Image: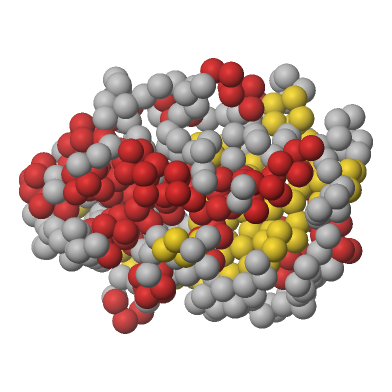
């Protein structure tokens, strides 16, 4: 049995033997739902207890129902915690096998799948998307025009150059989302008809191709459905559905049995982490918001479900430069390319106002990449990461030989939780100043 499986089973059983796991009562809800292993590397027990206290306070004050967190450093699990409840309505406790909707954490997986095909020479970063999805031959770019009386119109322009696979990976395709911003193009992407019916990746890509781009490709970082379209490219190149390819090439060999695009086994439905009422999504992507619905759309950008043990296997492979348990998934140079800034000043690529990586980060091929330390810190450069709409995040820190995965279902709290937790971890290594 793989070490990760041993650790997760140990946590689930609250064993105190091999990992010396100690039970801690969660007084906020009367449910014992936290475990922690002894510290290795540079993180102190006091620092880890501060993390535990912070998360318990978030639960007791009603900000989140529960969460799972895992920190791994120098080849060892240094901290694991299950806190609170996975479903406040049922009162079921959070456990290591709780299933979370990953939302945009799916993007890192799909990007990795695409880069495996690039490595094999079956796909090129500079290939035009229309080579694989012919409907993109007719794509247009939306240009807002404002008349003297203030009235706005949307004109359609031809692309200056074709959208490429590289553009999909680094979010410079011009494809956007409709859930933020007020531009005329974004409002078209918010049309509920875009998500009607039981469509598959091929049909969804054709629907997107009928919408105008928000910008010319390779001119601006703009967050959107680029990775969903990338998932369709993976299907065309591999001859498999996205899930079939990812299951064969990533999920099965890595040991990620609970990662999929919906929870097929009804017996596992009680394991699904549910948000508090205020954090439920009310957008038109109904099938994605409910992980129990069988659907043909395998959204490479937002559709995966997983457990913390599963996603930690994926993160550990990334930290180990594409290799895990003697099996190589990506070459080190491929992963180095993915984790290097692809939209720096030398590229001339602009950053739109909703630039989610933040001012101290660029963006690679699937991840945000740390390019400068935040003020008053010595956070390491080269850290790469991403987060999901419900607040979950992961980060890979090659400098400190560490990764962290945090799974939660609280979309109103995500950015704040990520900043606070990462600050506490780096403070524990002397790389930041406490806010309090």
Locate residue 420: give its quadrant: bottom right
Q: Is residue 32 left or right of residue 321?
A: right
Q: Position of residue 298 (x, y in %)?
A: 35, 35
Looking at the image, residue 267 sits to the left or right of residue 59; the answer is left
In the image, residue 188 lies at what x, y percent?
Answer: 27, 37
Asked whether residue 52 appears in the rendered view, the answer is: no
Residue sitting at 52 percent across and 75 percent down? 382
Residue 42 placement, left or right of 269: right
User: Which residue sits at x=86%, y=57%?
Assistant: 49
Q: Measured along the vertical axis of the image, is residue 103 above or below residue 78?
A: above
Q: Residue at x 24, y 43 (%)?
A: 235
Q: Position of residue 226 (x, y in %)?
A: 30, 50
Asked whether the viewer can see residue 110, the reply is yes
Front-most of 175 and 49?
49
The one of 46 and 264 positioned closer to us in this rendering: 264
Decide: is 107 above or below 302.
below
Q: Quadrant of the C terminus?
A: bottom right
Q: Residue 244, relative to residue 254: is it above or below? A: above
In the orientation shown, which residue stands out farthest toward the front? 1
Percent of width and height locating residue 120:
24, 62
Task: Judge from the rendering whether residue 297 lies leftward or rightward of residue 411; answer left or right.
Answer: left
């Amino acid at each position: 049995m793989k070490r990760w499986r041993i650790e997760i089973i140990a946590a689930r059983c609250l064993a105190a033997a091999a990992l010396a796991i100690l039970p801690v009562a969660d007084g906020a809800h009367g449910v014992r739902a936290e475990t922690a292993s002894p510290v290795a590397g540079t993180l102190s027990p006091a620092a880890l207890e501060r993390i535990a206290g912070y998360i318990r306070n978030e639960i007791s004050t009603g900000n989140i129902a529960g969460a799972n967190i895992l920190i791994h450093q120098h080849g060892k699990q240094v901290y694991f915690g299950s806190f609170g409840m996975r479903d406040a309505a049922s009162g079921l406790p959070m456990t290591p096998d709780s299933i979370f909707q990953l939302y945009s954490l799916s993007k890192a997986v799909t990007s990795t799948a695409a880069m495996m095909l690039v490595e094999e020479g079956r796909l090129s970063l500079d290939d035009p998307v229309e080579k694989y999805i012919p409907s993109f031959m007719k794509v247009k770019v939306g240009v807002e025009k404002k008349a003297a009386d203030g009235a706005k119109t949307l004109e359609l322009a031809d692309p200056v150059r074709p959208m490429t696979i590289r553009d999909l990976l680094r979010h410079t395709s011009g494809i956007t989302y409709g859930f933020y911003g007020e531009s005329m193009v974004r409002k078209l992407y918010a049309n509920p008809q875009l998500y009607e019916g039981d469509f598959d990746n091929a049909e969804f890509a054709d629907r997107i191709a009928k919408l105008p781009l928000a910008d010319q490709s390779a001119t601006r970082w703009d967050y959107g459905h680029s990775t969903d379209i990338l998932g369709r490219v993976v299907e065309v190149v591999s001859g498999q559905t996205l899930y079939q390819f990812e299951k064969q090439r990533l999920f099965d060999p890595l040991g990620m049995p609970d990662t999929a695009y919906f929870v097929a086994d009804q017996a596992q439905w009680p394991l699904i982490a549910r948000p508090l009422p205020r954090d439920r999504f009310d957008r038109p992507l109904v099938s994605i918001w409910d992980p129990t619905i069988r659907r043909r759309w395998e959204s490479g950008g937002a559709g995966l479900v997983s457990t913390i043990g599963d996603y930690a296997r994926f993160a550990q492979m990334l930290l180990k430069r594409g290799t895990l348990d003697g099996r190589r998934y990506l070459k080190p140079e491929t992963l180095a390319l993915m984790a290097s800034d692809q939209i720096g000043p030398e590229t001339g690529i602009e950053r739109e106002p909703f630039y989610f990586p933040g001012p101290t980060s660029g963006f690679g091929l699937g991840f945000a990449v740390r390019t400068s330390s935040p003020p008053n810190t010595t956070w390491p450069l080269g850290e790469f990461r991403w987060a999901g709409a419900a607040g979950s995040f992961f980060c890979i820190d090659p400098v400190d030989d560490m990764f962290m995965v945090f799974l939660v279902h609280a979309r109103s709290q995500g950015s704040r939780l990520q900043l606070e937790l990462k600050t506490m971890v780096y403070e524990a290594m002397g790389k930041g100043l406490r806010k309090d």
